[in-house]
Image (spheres, rainbow, N blue to C red):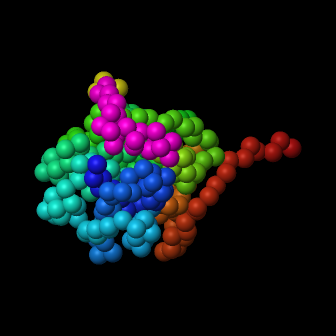
Amino acid sequence: MKVLWVSANLLGLELLKEAHHLICDDLTIMTLSKSSKTIMYDRVSTSEWYAFDSPVEQVSDITESAEKIKQISPDLVIMCGWRQIIKKELLNIPRFGWVGFHPTLLPRGRGPAPIINSILEGWKESGLTMFYLSEGLDDGDIIAQQQFVIDDRDHAMDVYKKIINAGKKIVTKYIPLLLENKAPRTKQNELKATFFKKPSLKDNQIDFANDSCDKIYKKIRALSKPYSGAYVKVADEKLIIWHASMALPKII
C-alpha cells in the first residue's frame, strides 16, 4: 500500500519514527516548506524529514497541492500535525481515505488548541484519538483512542509528551491494520460532542486585577512551551512567565 505521511510538527515526526519500519517500503512524506506562512509552534525543521530516506515533498499550502498528491497516488494518507483545512477534493484522492490524530478523546474537545484548552478547562484526563478525516470538524469515524492523566502540575509540554507516548502505542498497533484495510471504525456520538473555542493572542496576558490565582496558574501552564507563553505587562514590555507552581500558604 502506498502511504503519504503529511506532517510538519514534533508529534508527527516522533510517530513516524515509531511507525517508519512498518511503511518504509512505499512511503512519501509531505511537509511544510520554509516559505509557508502557516504558524505552528511545535514545527520541526524540514531537514528532519529527509532522515527517513523516503521521498519528501515540500508545500506551502496543501489546498494547492491536489495535483501533486494525485501524482503521488497514495492508497492511504496519514496526517499528523497540520494546521490547514483538508478539502473534499483532497479527501477523495486516496482510496482508503485520510487518517488523522486529535489530542482529546473525541467527540469531547473538538476544535482548535486542544492542549491549551484542556489545561485551561482543568481537565483531569484526556487522550489521543486516531480517526478518519471528513469534511466536518474532527467528526470522522474513530479508529483508536489512548487515554492519559493530566496532572495538576503538568505544563503544556508535559501533556505533549504524554500525547507522543499515547501516539506511539496507537501507531504500533493500528498502522498494520490500516495497511491491511482491517482497521476498526466507530461513528462518533454527536450527542456527546463538545467544542473548544479558538484562543487569541490577547488571551495570553495575565490580568492580576481580575484573574483568580487558579486561572493565572492554568494560563501559565497552558501557554508554556512550545507555545508563546503567558505574560504580564511591565511598562511597555512583556514579561513572559514560562513556569509556575502552586504552594499552600505557611501557617505561622
- Above or below 101: residue 16: below
- Above or below 14: residue 118: above
How many tags in the picture?
A: 0
Residue 102 lies in what quarter of the image? top left
Q: At x 53% / y 61%, what residue is drawn?
A: 225
The span picked out in magenta is: 168-189
- Residue sitting at the far front: 25
Picture coordinates of residue 246, whole percent (x, y): 68, 47
Q: At x 58% / y 62%, what residue is drawn?
A: 241
- Above or below 34: residue 202: above
Q: 156 left or right of 90?
A: right
Q: Nearer the viewer, residue 248 or 86?
A: 86
Picture coordinates of residue 182, whole percent (x, y): 33, 33
Q: At x 60% / y 47%, what residue is drawn?
A: 154
Is 170 in the magenta? yes
Residue 57 lies in what quarter of the image? bottom left
Picture coordinates of residue 109, whole percent (x, y): 39, 38
Picture coordinates of residue 172, whole percent (x, y): 47, 43
Quadrant where the image shows the C terminus:
top right
